[in-house]
């Protein structure tokens, strides 16, 4: 893989990871249960570290990481239903991965 292709791959991966981070961040705002929210905070901290690693790799390769947020889709529902819908949606997405 040449350096240009490698940079493009890193940038694409960064955009996808950033979208997932923003999705989890928005989901955490809807989960009020202490245990559930703590789990999201752990996930967000881990994903933030991943984004930092990718950002550094992109910069070292001469590129720029695109931090612009993409469309963050969350399942609809009321407060308690929203928390359950977010958790179920995350479980479904992880299972399909």
Image (cartoon, rainbow, N blue to C red):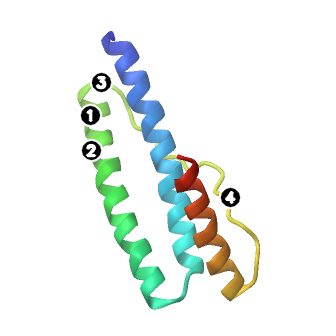
**Horizontal placement of 44 versus 91: left or right?**
left
The image's mark for residue 53 is: 2
The mark lying in front, picked from 2 and 3, is 2
* Residue at horizontal 44 percent and vertical 36 percent from the top: 13
- Secondary element at image label 2: helix
Q: Residues within 10 Å of mark 4 (few under 14, many from 20)?
A: few
- Secondary element at image label 4: loop
Is disc 4 in contact with disc 3, using a CB cutoff of under 8 Å? no
Q: Earlier in the sequence, mark 2 or mark 3?
A: 2
Q: Earlier in the sequence, mark 4 or mark 2?
A: 2
Q: Is residue 5 above or below residue 73?
A: above
Residue 84 position, x and y percent, is 64, 78
Name the residue carrying label 3.
Answer: 62
Is disc 1 in contact with disc 2, using a CB cutoff of under 8 Å? yes
Q: CA distance from mark 2 to mark 3?
A: 14 Å
Name the residue carrying label 4.
Answer: 73
- Secondary element at image label 3: loop
Q: CA distance from mark 4 to mark 1?
A: 28 Å
Q: Earlier in the sequence, mark 4 or mark 1?
A: 1
The mark lying in front, picked from 4 and 1, is 4
* Residue at horizontal 44 percent and vertical 72 percent from the top: 40
- Secondary element at image label 1: helix
Q: CA distance from mark 4 to mark 2?
A: 25 Å
User: Viewer-proximal residue, 85 or 59?
Assistant: 85
Q: Earlier in the sequence, mark 1 or mark 3?
A: 1
Residue 30 position, x and y percent, is 60, 79
């Amino acid at each position: 893989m040449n350096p240009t292709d490698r940079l493009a791959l890193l940038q694409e991966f960064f955009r996808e990871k950033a979208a997932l981070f923003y999705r989890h961040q928005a989901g955490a705002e809807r989960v009020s249960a202490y245990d559930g929210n703590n789990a999201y905070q752990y996930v967000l901290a881990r994903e933030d570290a991943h984004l930092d690693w990718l950002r550094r790799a992109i910069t070292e390769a001469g590129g720029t990481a695109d931090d612009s947020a993409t469309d963050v889709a969350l399942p609809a529902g009321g407060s308690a239903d929203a928390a359950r819908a977010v958790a179920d949606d995350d479980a479904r997405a992880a299972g399909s991965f």
